[in-house]
Image (cartoon, rainbow, N blue to C red):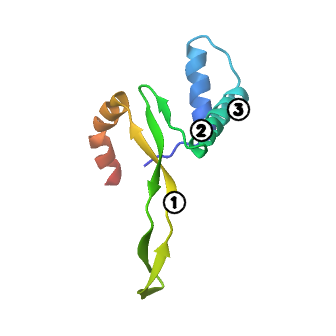
Amino acid sequence: MATITKRELAIRITEKLALRGIEITQQTISEIVQVLIDEITETLAAGDNVVMRKFGAFEVRELKAKLGRNPKDPTSTVKIPARAAVKFKPGKEMKEKVAATLTVVRERKK
């Protein structure tokens, strides 16, 4: 499976905007992407949710404390403290587009 980096994302956005007649440098787009990521991170760190219509929602959830096993010594248990974790819930449009790619995903695994 292919992975896209922030740099590749900036290149794609720059190219798509150029097709629409909007000339913005890759450096500017990279900075915009980084600011977006920083804002989402800061908002979540403050305990607030981030909702982007047609994309999805990020929310902070509490994972309760639990007992786990030490992989190096499976006979001993380890206390795993409660912590906050980010959960992403995709929007309707994203769910539909991703669901339609099942055959592509299966082909790549072969």
Q: To which quarter of the image does residue 48 belong?
A: top right
Left/right of residue 36 with respect to residue 88 in the rendered view:
right
Q: Earlier in the sequence, mark 1 or mark 2?
A: 2
Q: Is residue 84 above or below residue 46?
A: below
Q: Is residue 80 above or below residue 9?
A: below
**SS under mark 2:** helix
Q: Is residue 92 above or below residue 60?
A: above
Q: Earlier in the sequence, mark 1 or mark 3?
A: 3
> Dot 3, how many residues are within 10 Å of its Cα: few (below 14), some (14-19), or many (20+)?
few
**SS under mark 1:** strand
Q: Which mark is residue 2?
A: none
Left/right of residue 107 with respect to residue 57 in the rendered view:
left
Q: Residue at x 47, y 31 (%)?
A: 51
Q: Which residue is mark 3?
A: 31
Q: Which mark is residue 43?
A: 2
Q: Which mark is residue 83?
A: 1
Per the model, the C-alpha gap separating discs 1 and 3 is 31 Å
User: x and y percent of residue 30 in the render?
Assistant: 67, 33
Q: To which quarter of the image does residue 8 belong?
A: top right
User: x and y percent of residue 110 in the render?
Assistant: 31, 54
Three-letter amino acid code at the position of disc 2 = Thr
Q: Report the front residue among 84 and 41.
A: 84
Disc 1 vs disc 3: which is toward the camera? 1
> Dot 1, how many residues are within 10 Å of its Cα: few (below 14), some (14-19), or many (20+)?
few
Q: Is residue 84 above or below residue 93?
A: below
Q: Earlier in the sequence, mark 3 or mark 2?
A: 3
Q: Residue at x 63, y 13 (%)?
A: 22
User: x and y percent of residue 50 in the render?
Assistant: 51, 34
